[in-house]
Amino acid sequence: MSITTVVGTAIKTASVLLGVGIGKITIIPVLIAALAYFNYDLMDPENHPRVTKQLRKEYDFVVIGGGSAGSVLANRLTENPNWNVLLLEAGGHETEITDVPILSLYLHKSKLDWKYRTQPQDTACQAMIDKRCCWTRGKVLGGSSVLNTLLYIRGNRRDFDEWKSFGNPGWGYEDVLPYFKKSQDQRNPYLARNTRYHGTGGYLTVQNSPYVTPLGVAFLQAGEEMGYDICDINGEQQTGFAFFQFTMRRGARCSTAKAFVRPIQLRKNFHLSLWSHVTRVLIDPQSRKTYGVEFIRDGRKEVVSVKKEVILSAGAINSPQLLMLSGVGPYVHLKELGIPVIEDSPGVGQNLQDHIAVGGLVFPIDYKISIVMNRMVNINSALRYAITEDGPLTSSIGLEAVGFISTKYANQTDDWPDIEFMLTSSSTNSDGGSHIKNAHCLTDDFYNEIFSKINNQDVFGVFPMMLRPKSRGYIRLKSKKPLDVPLLYHNYLTHPHDVAVLREGVKAAIAFGETNSMKRFGSRFHSKPLPNCKHIPLYTDEYWNCVVRQYTMTIYHMSGTAKMGPSDDPMAVVNPELRVYGVEGLRVIDASIMPTITSGNINAPVIMIAEKGADMIKERWM
Ligand SMILES: Cc1cc2nc3c(=O)[nH]c(=O)nc-3n(C[C@H](O)[C@H](O)[C@H](O)COP(=O)(O)OP(=O)(O)OC[C@H]3O[C@@H](n4cnc5c(N)ncnc54)[C@H](O)[C@@H]3O)c2cc1C
Ligand SMILES: *[C@@H]1O[C@H](CO)[C@@H](O)[C@H](O)[C@H]1NC(C)=O
């Protein structure tokens, strides 16, 4: 790294911190230096990809949505120089803030977020404003991989074997493993040696966090104390504890835009159009052939034609929305809204799955070792981040270790855990109520009653996340207007199994806080009774059943809304090649196609789906 780069990055980071209102340095020199840095930035070979001003009238392929999946597709399809590919993305570029792992909370509700909110329901999210959960989604090149917390988790081998058993040949674990490895550049030398499970040299950089607190090691020891192994949870055995791995490159976020789109910006057959909001896929009602895409750019409606295929990668909310707007969806619903039906596909927008955890399980400790935002985010840490690419700013808000555990509802002799512990050296109180509260949409009353007394105190957090929910939500259109926000029904905790598993997860989290390994730090459960549950005898099952419905935290894993399945499954929207039933030349390739959600955070599986999808497209046309 040259000295200009170092100084440039330091200045850039410092000005970012100033921009978001943290750090205390004089503004003038920083601005001057930031301007000087701007010139340097223009020459950076890893800079934001160029936007194509003059589009063609026709492309071989049009990819809708440049998120986790769409970025991969743009890259892999342009590998064939004879194919012209257009990527349409509603959002713009990544920013300096999106690069800094600890600042991901600042991205919720920003202009990079679609800012979705679910319909109010009384089964969950009762501590949130208007009882509506906030569903952050990325509206930016790189999609939700630009806003996420960078965790790299593949899921359980049985998830994929189950997909196959539903009638989806080619989707079993052994079939998909090569696609996980294909993307991957595993930077942990110990893991990289295990070539059965890990790949090196791929576009997506995966590494350990350069910054760990003493709590990180203790989390693993506590896991061992509870009888679990420490293992590579993306390898041979999932049940157990491990340090998280992150989609991170030299301490900065490695979004799919950075990994897959920046390197291909000079390919002549690749066109990129940002700030381009797709409103409809054009399908001929007679021949049922897809012939184009309609979108709004600079306030004007535009149309491009497509020769081979349109690929919908707009994510689990917008892909089904666009299918319905284009006439593919449940017949009665489309008729009601006055949308001409091209294909009656009852599964579109149904089968909505997500992972939820219980927020606010906080354990105060006696040592100043955890992530407290106002202590970590300052000019010293900015300089350290810029110069050595490590330090507290590389911490993904304290996410340090993961535990895959089995409650009494899981098969104990099997390696298919039903709860994931996300173990953090921070929690909801760690920024004094400035951003986390808003990101999670907690009411002021709830936040103040539960957290104000421990604002900015040293704590750790355990987020028990339920891996295989049985409840299913759904998505509907509000009207046939493409810019109307769709109606989102989470249906969280409507199945009694889900309440039971999550409750056992909470109990296990509290037991975790009681281990000797955590007690060493003075760990004690912040047991403040929740406002809506105080009337129930404390710490009974009934009490916990109430608790899980209050601070119900989405982990932002919406999926399943255009599921893959065999032709005899009426709810299947796409076939095992991800082609939309009843329509020619249209595929869905993103989180929507999961028949069941995978047992872990889903970004890596979505990238795998796109890698495999790209290969299937190549097979079809080469
Ligand atoms: C806050 C947050 C934290 C998360 N943390 C993690 C984590 O740590 N680890 C993990 O594995 N997963 C995490 N996830 C989940 C993971 O990032 C997503 O599941 C994944 O990125 C989804 O990929 P996708 O391609 O299906 O959709 P997205 O990545 O959301 O991409 C969809 C793209 O389509 C664009 N688009 C939508 N509609 C239109 C339209 N009409 N016209 C044009 N473009 C459109 C969007 O702007 C977006 O860029 C997190 C998600 C969020 C939001
Ligand atoms: C539990 O898992 C084991 C190992 O995979 C399997 O043999 C057994 O049938 C499972 N039990 C139940 C009740 O599903």
Image (spheres, grey):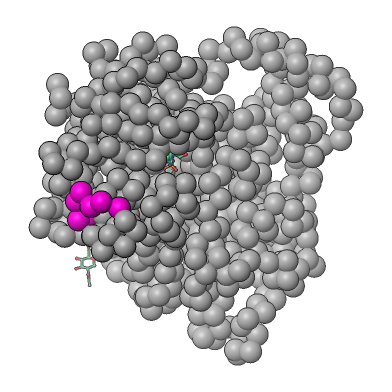
Indicate whether residue 176 is drawn in magenta. no
Residue at image coords 38%, 78%: 496
User: Where is residue 456 shown, x and y percent of the image?
Assistant: 78, 56
Q: Give the magenta-colored segment's residue range.
A: 339-345
Q: In the image, ligand 2 is in what quadrant?
A: bottom left
Give residue 458's quadrant in the image.
bottom right
* Residue sticking out furthest to the front: 338
Q: Say whether residue 29 is left or right of residue 492.
A: right
Residue 337 in view of the camera: yes
- Vertical arrangement, residue 509 with respect to residue 281, above or below: below
In this rendering, position of residue 127 left or right of residue 138: right
Seen in the picture, residue 493 relative to 181 is either above or below; the reply is below
Q: Position of residue 457 (x, y in %)?
A: 77, 58
Q: Quadrant of residue 62?
A: top left
The residue sitting at 68% across, 37% down in the picture is 393
Left or right: 529 in relation to 56: right
The residue closer to the viewer here, 239 or 262, is 262
Q: Where is residue 69 in the image (x, y as percent from the top left)?
A: 37, 37
Find residue 27 and report its horizontal and vertical position in percent. Answer: 86, 27
Q: In which quarter of the image is the C terminus?
A: top left
Task: Please tell me which residue lies in front, 281 or 472.
Answer: 281
